[in-house]
Image (cartoon, rainbow, N blue to C red):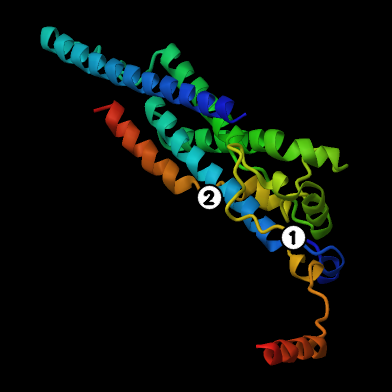
Amino acid sequence: MTWFSKSTTTFGFLLLAHACYSAYEHSALQSHRAASLSSLSATTQQAAASSSLPLDISLETIVATIIITLGLVLNTQKLRPIQWRVWAGHIERAGEEGARNSSGEVDKDYVGNPFKLLESRPGFVDIRKQRKEFAEWVKQQ
Amino acid sequence: MPTEREFQVAPIVPESVMHNTKVLSNLQSLTASIFGVAAGILGLESYSGFLFYFIFTVLTTILFYTFRVAPTSLKSGLGPLDTSRYFRTQYEFWAGGVMGGMAGYILTWTLFYGLVRA
């Protein structure tokens, strides 16, 4: 999925750059023509010439914007459920696999099971037995 | 608006709320500057420029809903256009990013308007 969103975004940026250059060339040409026309005759033909963009450049700009938006939306990270019962069930079922992003790495701000501390607790230690064992070991030395 | 009692019954995860809000606002500010480039190329002025921004922001939010929220939200039994699985309020999702991206939009809008019509 990641290659699809990235190539979509790249294609959109190419289209947008092309539209931008075309619009720049168009406005440069229009101002040049207006200047040469006004030097030839004193008629006011240059009005509204540079303000209107050709239809194909406008369409290309809008299509490029929509394509870039689509690519960026597809490139976003997965959302996480905000309700505790939904999110806890998601963690239990999916674990770290559920938090992987599109490039296969675990997200940096992934917390995981917040009750891990309570779930894995060491058992009680028989401290008297350990003390006796230690005393015997010291005697043997 | 949920009451305190409802928050006690069905608690929410602050980390997930922050994550979701961050994802959405990152997308909004990034796309807003792209829309500014497009508006500058098209040479929009005054009200039509702001109209362009609002239309495309709404389009972004709808796309985001379609691709990121809807697949799992509809599967879990929520109705269409209901974002309560991932966002606390509907307002936060549908209108939260409109003002956030405005500054970036105007920045690139004016920049590209000036670049193209030099």
Give residue B9's position: percent from left, percent from top: 87, 66
Q: Is residue A71 above or below residue B84?
A: above
Q: Is residue B8 left or right of residue B16?
A: right
Give residue B15's position: percent from left, percent from top: 66, 60
**According to the image, label 2 marks what residue?**
B99
Give residue A61's position: percent from left, percent from top: 45, 22
SS type, badge 1: loop
Q: Real-space Cα distance between discs 1 and 2?
A: 35 Å
Give residue A11's position: percent from left, percent from top: 47, 21
Chain designation of label 1? A
**According to the image, label 1 marks what residue?**
A113
Residue at image location 55% in from the left, 42% down from the top: B27
Residue at image location 77% in from the left, 66% down from the top: A115
Q: Is residue B28 above or below residue A24?
A: below
Q: Is residue B4 left or right of residue A100?
A: right
Q: Is residue A39 left or right of residue A117?
A: left
- Type of residue at label 1? Asn
Q: Quadrant of residue A46?
A: top left
